[in-house]
Image (cartoon, rainbow, N blue to C red):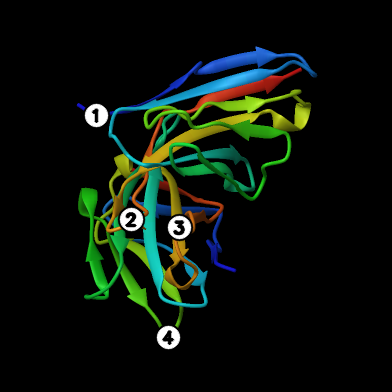
Amino acid sequence: AQSVAQPEDQVNVAEGNPLTVKCTYSVSGNPYLFWYVQYPNRGLQFLLKYITGDNLVKGSYGFEAEFNKSQTSFHLKKPSALVSDSALYFCAVRDMAVGNTPLVFGKGTRLSVIA
Amino acid sequence: DAEITQSPRHKITETGRQVTLACHQTWNHNNMFWYRQDLGHGLRLIHYSYGVQDTNKGEVSDGYSVSRSNTEDLPLTLESAASSQTSVYFCASSESVAGVVTGELFFGEGSRLTVL
């Protein structure tokens, strides 16, 4: 069965510093991988996705993620954090080997960017 | 602009009552999903639908039901509300390309349900 893990409940980073939010996944076939962001009292918003091709994926608001097949990871990164990046971040996966299955989400990582 | 709307945004009910949460999307997406969000659990899938008259159970479907009579709507019903169903509920939709669900979900703003 497909699954995704976000090993950190909370990540704190100073404004202007690079940030990384970690995600690892488990699938039997090839993965579709996604990152979503949730601001307080809002629904989730799509940030970026990996389906195939270049392992470095660029998304909204200056975020990027690197797909690493050997480490089964899809970490979210940003070179310089902003206070406005503070939010809850979710990684999600679909296993392409099992047909049209819905996305499975991780438990989320709360990012706090400190001024 | 296309959108996905949920109602009500907030509801308080009593144990044992039937509750229906509405979800309406104007994206014309075939695929619709209901998730619940709880602290420590992230998002968990309740039910989903890949088209009119199609419904499927998700990870935490017990005590919930859905019906899909048209493309735009997927109402979620709690037949007999329980305190364990106190949560924030999110509806989402996505398109399919060549019959494959693309996976990029568009979410509503959520419905916060409290069962007393």
- Marks 4 and 2 share the same chain: no
Residue type pointed to by label 3: Ala
Q: CA distance from mark 4 to mark 1?
A: 39 Å
Residue nearer the viewer, B16 or B39: B16
Residue nearer the viewer, B66 or B41: B66
Q: CA distance from mark 3 to mark 2?
A: 13 Å
- 1 or 2: tag closer to the N-terminus: 1
Residue A18 can be seen in this image? no
- Marks 4 and 1 share the same chain: no
Q: Position of residue B63 (x, y in %)?
A: 73, 34
Q: CA distance from mark 4 to mark 2?
A: 24 Å
Point 28% across, 34% down: residue: B27
Q: CA distance from mark 4 to mark 3?
A: 18 Å
Q: Which residue is mark 4?
A: A70
Point 45% across, 57% down: residue: A92
Horizontal side of residue A23 vs B106, given as left or right:
right
Point 24% across, 61% down: residue: A79
Q: CA distance from mark 1 to mark 3?
A: 24 Å
Q: Position of residue A95 (x, y in %)?
A: 46, 68
Q: Mark number for residue B102?
A: 2
